[in-house]
Amino acid sequence: MELTRREALLGVVSRCVPVAAALAVPAEAAEETPSQPKAPVGMLYDATLCIGCKACVVACAEANDLPRDVSLDGLHQAPEDLNAFTKNIIKLYKPTDNSPDSFVKQQCMHCLDPACVAACPFKALWKNDGNGLVAWEPSRCIGCRYCEIACPYHVPKFEWDRINPKIVKCELCRPRLAKGYEPACTSVCPTHAVIFGPREGLLTQAKDRIAQAPDKYFENRVYGEHEAGGTQVLYLSHVPFEDLGLPNLGPEPIPARLKWQKRVYKFLALPLLLYAGLAGLMKKNWIDHRKEMQEEGRRTGLRPQL
Amino acid sequence: MIWSGKPKPTVAAHLKRCGVPRRDFLQFCTQLMVAAPWGLAITEKATAAEVAREIGLARRPSVIWLHFQDCTGCSETLLRTSKPDLADLILHVISLDYHETLMAACGYQAEAALSQAVNNNAGKFVLVVEGSIPTRDQGIYMKLAGKPALNVLKDVASQAGAIIAIGSCASWGGIPSADPNPTGAVGVDEIIKNKPVVNLPGCPPNPYTLLGVVFQFARKGTLPELDDQHRPKFAYDRVIHDHCPRRAHFDAGRFVQQYGDEGHRHGWCLYKLGCKGPDTHAGCSTRHFNEIPDVWPIGIGAPCIGCTEKHLAFRVPLFQEVPIHAATPPDTYPPVHTATGTISAPGVAVVSLIGGALGGAAWVAARRFQSEEETAAIIKANLPSSPKDNPNTEGR
């Protein structure tokens, strides 16, 4: 018996779609609104105060016990971007014309409704109900990299050089917070360009700074107040936010833009279904083949062969 | 040489008797403070006058200085101050009771001097050892008054109050212990196991480090805090690289490529000439020699050879670079938007050509293979004339 392409596709679809629909429909019916953290903490980074000393980069690597990324010249800790060895980086925006330049600190934004948490199939990335930081649980991570693709800020990074690779991202110095210390980066900043505190307090302070110097800050607004549902790391800048690598995301949280997909991908349901369908198809073909083989054997009287 | 059975006078009394100006002594104390500022009890004072009072109260420490396989460079460093007064002063504040190259006596007289100095201050004197000790073949490669150096050291050390190994040779073997080490040269702490040995490696070490240790022992009877290689932390706790005046050039990536080039003339970083600063613990970058700023190897444009480190000096080739253990950020920044490569038109064309060629070749090759029907026809044509013998030749 010969299986046509049409039959194969139909077989897969007929097995997968009902289950997917069964999973998706209750998901839509019970579409929960994400719970907001009770007392979100965060950081406020003021690009006008940053002097680019990179004390935070060194402190971050030390506090998180990260190996130094010396891939550039073997001598300096000079990562090009956030990577498996770098959870925090200072970059330079330097326009070619004479318009003002600026440093920018990049680390996890700790979104109020994070895309990475929504994308993670096994809740390896999870948002703390209390202080709201987005943490990563190594024992649940399967290394699928969905978070890396989902994050609009390109924060989670994959350990490409490891045999059993995991995800690396800023967790706002979770162990230090547990001991009552502030994150390493804010604790060493010599100009207080990055400060740590409750999100509400930081937002008020940022707005105070804008009120005191009305023409100093770009569009007189705080980045992260509303962006993608709000982030717990807030930015003030004198240059356009997009030039600092902070995308214009709109007020809607990214997970809210997803409908049924979220539930379908939970626990890798859809890929697993797809594989199950393919396995079913293979089994059917195998049985058909054996039948055909036995028939042939009966007909010719020879021992059935493959 | 002065020795007697009476207790030594205090430093202050002796200086007064010799008519040494107080100004000189204060200047000396300031140098000591600068040279040994951290972790040394005797110099942890607010002013030089307080240090002078503290040192003045100490009885002049009796020092016995033994020379083994050495170059006398460590002795020279004690005497080569930028001002002759200071060298003179050093010999006033310590009581150097036996020193082979500085004393007038020789022969039997010198031997008598040693035994008298040892006996008069037994259990109290500071033994300073300069040079490594040969151990191969029962130590016959160096003898003093017919006795192997090994025995001399054991005899004198058994009576000593404190033992200081000055220089890299006495600390761990130094130059004489470099491959192939024909004399089996070792440092003092390889031989003296039952007493603490303070190592002051360096080629030579800063003389004020020695004075700091000697004064602390004379005044308090204690030794300063030591690291795992028995070096006083106050002088050997810092990495040269972290306090190097040329560090800015390292961070900016400005390296001397060869001696005398443009960068060398401009005082750039010597790392690529094999400078061992990043792996070397010593105070050289903060405490320069001869009381003159910038008088130390890197200051005059010569790479550090790592003389205070047992695993570096005379073991790692001079021009070999050392690994950077704790890399720090450079003086440069990555751009916000990292440039990512795009696919160029010529690239697409080349890949398409290769793909097309492979595809064409596959098609031609496929045509050359006979189809199943053709094969069956050929077999049928070549079969013997009675095909009925085996009906199963048909099909598969």
Image (cartoon, coloured by chain):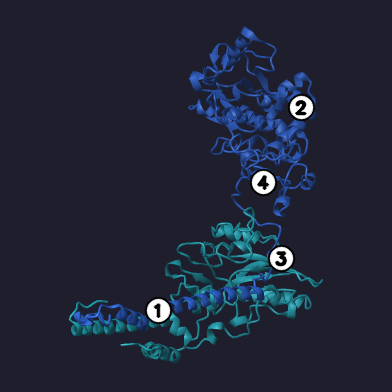
Chain colours: A cyan, B blue
- The residue to which callout 2 is attached is B86
Q: Position of residue B375 (x, y in %)?
A: 35, 79
Which of the chains bears the disc numbered 2? B
Query: Which corner quadrant of the image does residue B46 belong to?
Result: top right
- The amino acid on which the numbered mark 2 sits, given as a three-letter code, is Leu
Neighbours of disc 3 within 10 Å: few (<14), some (14-19), many (20+): many
Which of the chains bears the disc numbered 3? A
**Label 3 and label 2 in one chain:** no
Check residue A50 in the rendering and tell me which mark sits there, or answer none: 3
Q: Position of residue B202 (x, y in %)?
A: 64, 33
Dot 1 lies on which element? loop
**Label 2 and label 1 in one chain:** yes
Of the two numbered discs 1 and 4 in the rendering, the one whose residue sits closer to the viewer: 1
- The amino acid on which the numbered mark 3 sits, given as a three-letter code, is Cys
Of the two numbered discs 3 and 1 in the rendering, the one whose residue sits closer to the viewer: 1
- Front residue of B145 and B127: B145
Dot 3 lies on which element? loop
- The residue to which callout 4 is attached is B241
- The residue to which callout 1 is attached is B370
- Marks 4/2 in contact by CB < 8 Å: the verdict is no
- The amino acid on which the numbered mark 4 sits, given as a three-letter code, is His
Q: Position of residue A284 (x, y in %)?
A: 30, 84
What is the spatial separation of the Cα atoms under label 3 and label 4, in whole angstroms?
26 Å
Of the two numbered discs 2 and 1 in the rendering, the one whose residue sits closer to the viewer: 1
Q: Position of residue A271 (x, y in %)?
A: 42, 80
What is the spatial separation of the Cα atoms under label 4 and label 2, in whole angstroms?
30 Å
Neighbours of disc 2 within 10 Å: few (<14), some (14-19), many (20+): many
- The amino acid on which the numbered mark 1 sits, given as a three-letter code, is Gln
- Front residue of A169 and B17: A169
